[in-house]
Amino acid sequence: MKYDESESRDDKVKRIPIFNPDTSNWPNSIRTVSPDDFEMMAVDVHGRLYWDGKLIKIAQLTLSSWQKVAGVVIAISAFVGALIPAWIWGCELGWVGVCPIPPLVGA
């Protein structure tokens, strides 16, 4: 995606409003980031992000074998669960050439 210079900042703000966080429930020990704080941010040649010279750790999610199997089973179930009604609907409209059950037209 390229940066669109033709759109003004005001147009962008109208399209995507500036987010103003509700800081009333934040702990007293934190505050919002000011533009001066961005000087504490850095990036190395590998694209890793640093804050005040310390590497910001990004946790990677690793699924166990059982979680992967469960994900595949759920994905297949969702696909079949959507395919069967779509197939029946296609049969009723005459879009599908092979229909396992007779169409329920007029039922």
Image: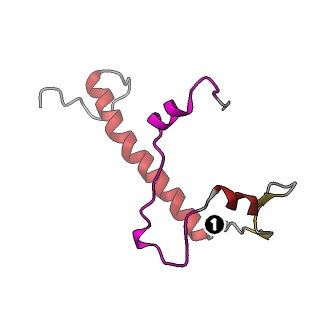
Q: Residue 31, located in which quarter of the rendered image?
A: bottom right
Image quarter (top left, top right, bottom left or bottom right) of the N terminus: top right
Q: Using the image as rendered, state which of residue 67 and residue 77 is in the foreground.
A: 67
Q: Is residue 12 above or below residue 59?
A: above
Residue name at image x 52 percent, y 60 percent:
71
- Whether residue 48 is visible: no
How many numbered badges does the structure rendering display? 1
Question: In the image as oriented, which residue stretches furthest toward the front?
Answer: 36
Residue 11 lies in the magenta-colored region: yes
Residue 19, position as x, y percentages in the image: 47, 51
Q: Check disc 1 and report the residue beneath it.
A: 61
Question: In the image as oriented, which residue stretches furthest toward the left?
Answer: 107
Residue type pointed to by label 1:
Leu
Residue 39 as seen in the image, left or right of residue 90? right
Q: Residue 97, located in which quarter of the rendered image?
A: top left
Residue 63 as seen in the image, left or right of residue 88? right
Secondary element at tag 1 = loop
Q: Residue 39, located in which quarter of the rendered image?
A: bottom right
Residue name at image x 35 percent, y 34 percent:
87
Residue 47, position as x, y percentages in the image: 80, 54
Residue name at image x 33 percent, y 28 percent:
90
The residues colored magenta run 4-32
Residue 102, position as x, y percentages in the image: 24, 30
Q: Using the image as rendered, state which of residue 17 and residue 3 is in the foreground.
A: 17
Image quarter (top left, top right, bottom left or bottom right) of the C terminus: top left
